[in-house]
Image (spheres, helix red, strand yellow):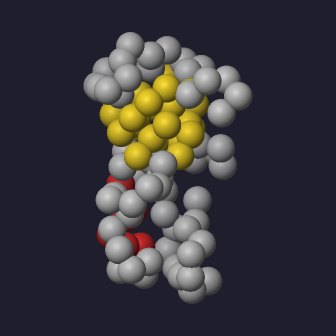
Amino acid sequence: MTIENGASASAPALSLIDPSSYDAVCSLVDGCLVCGDVAVPVTVVEAGEPDALCEDPQGQRGMVGIELVAPIEAGDRLLVHGGVAISRLGESA
């Protein structure tokens, strides 16, 4: 996923489920993305604790902390912010 809010075309990619990608982008978008209203819906591919393997709508996969929404199972839809699932999503989200 790439952030599109005034950053140049050569801006690095931002993975919303991999917080380590924030460092390269925060300075380009005039602020900290962790503190912004940036979240992404994901689907649980493989449930685990304390992390689960999840996939975003673009097919990127990454580990997501699930402490706030556990227990979960494969196929569940979650809203992720800063690498942590912050809520469950209904099927229409």
Residue 58 spot, x, y in % from top left: 66, 49
| Image quadrant containing the C terminus | top right
Image x and y of residue 33, in percent = 38, 63
Up-down: is 75 above or below 4?
above
**Residue under the point 38% across and 23% down:** 69
Rendered view: 13 above or below 79 = below
Which residue ends up furthest to the right in the rendered image?
A: 92
Residue at 58%, 66% (x, y): give it.
Answer: 2
Quadrant where the image shows the N terminus? bottom right
**Would you say 68 lies left or right of 8 here?**
left
Camera sees residue 20? no
Lateral position of residue 10 relative to residue 91, left or right: left
Q: Quadrant of residue 64?
A: top left
- The quarter of the displayed image where residue 92 is located: top right
Q: Residue at x 55, y 68 (%)?
A: 3
Residue 37 occupies quadrant: bottom left
* Left or right, 20 with reference to 93: left
Q: Residue at x 46, y 55 (%)?
A: 38
User: In terms of depth relative to the viewer, which is nearer, 82 or 45?
Assistant: 82
Looking at the image, which is closer to me, 38 or 50?
38
Where residue 27 sits in the image (x, y, percent)?
35, 80
32, above or below 86, in the image: below
**Residue 18 place in picture, x, y as percent:** 40, 51
In the rendered picture of this protein, how many numbered marks are placed on residues?
0
Q: Is residue 69 visible?
A: yes
The single residue placed furthest to the front in the displayed view is 37
